Image (cartoon, rainbow, N blue to C red):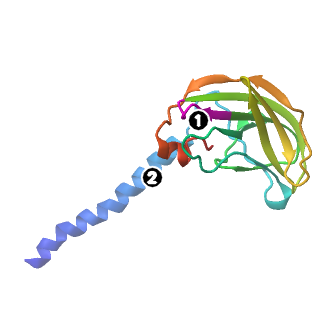
Amino acid sequence: MKIRDKEPEMHRSAGVPLFVAALAIALSACANHRAEGQLASYRATVGGEEAAVVRNTGPWFVWPGQNQLYAHLERIDRAPSATRGRSHEVDPGERVLTVGGRYCCRAWRMLDIGEVDLETTLLAGHVYLVRNTFGDGVMTFWIEDELTHQLVSERRSTKTTQVKNRNVGIPAVMFGGFLR
């Protein structure tokens, strides 16, 4: 009798890996599907020392009540960056980098946001920073070499758009509400 009691258990456990495999295949098909007309994400063709690195600037941690300014890389040559986080590997050469910025104020209830295209020439092995300033509703962006602090793009300004912050919860703001 004990053999018969364990037999259905064995059949159930054999179906679990099959279900997990089918689910993984279905989810990967959904993840790889791209809407028609959507640009493919940008991925550098070189890596390591052969690539240029572009880093976002801004705080990792935001204390309640502080005003914070953050700059990030949105697109490389008009294609969205495939890299999420603070550092992006980019092929060296002439590039158009679309950079964005956020200024958080008024107890995180409002954000001032801006975005511009910057033309630059990136060198292999160099690290570059996306920088910005904000004042009187205008955000100014530029790219600079991290080591020499020389500008490698022109400074370009844009009027900001003020939007309501949907990440008002303090934990969301403190731990990545503004990070890209």
Q: Are marks 1 and 2 in contact (CB under 8 Å)?
A: no
Q: Tell me the residue at 87%/57% (across/down).
A: 125
Which quadrant of the figure contains the C terminus?
top right
Relative to residue 59, is residue 120 depicted above or below?
A: above
Residue 90 drawn at (x, y percent)? 79, 48
Residue type beneath disc 1: Arg
Q: Does residue 172 appear left or right of residue 158 in this picture? A: left
Check disc 2 and report its element: helix, strand or loop. Answer: helix
Q: Residue furthest front?
A: 65
Residue 53 drawn at (x, y percent)? 79, 51
Q: Does residue 42 appear left or right of residue 28 in this picture? A: right
Q: Quadrant of residue 8?
A: bottom left
Q: Earlier in the sequence, mark 1 or mark 2?
A: 2
Towards the viewer: 167 or 67: 67
Residue 41: in magenta span: no
Residue 123 drawn at (x, y percent)? 90, 50
Q: Which residue bears the numbered disc 2?
A: 24
Residue 108: in magenta span: yes
Q: Which residue bears the numbered disc 1?
A: 34
Q: Mark 1, residues whose alpha carbon is within 10 Å: few (<14), some, or many (≥20)?
A: few
Residue type beneath disc 2: Ala
> Which span of residues is magenta-colored?
102-109
Q: Quadrant of residue 65?
A: top right
Residue 107 drawn at (x, y percent)? 54, 34
Q: Mark 2, residues whose alpha carbon is within 10 Å: few (<14), some, or many (≥20)?
A: few
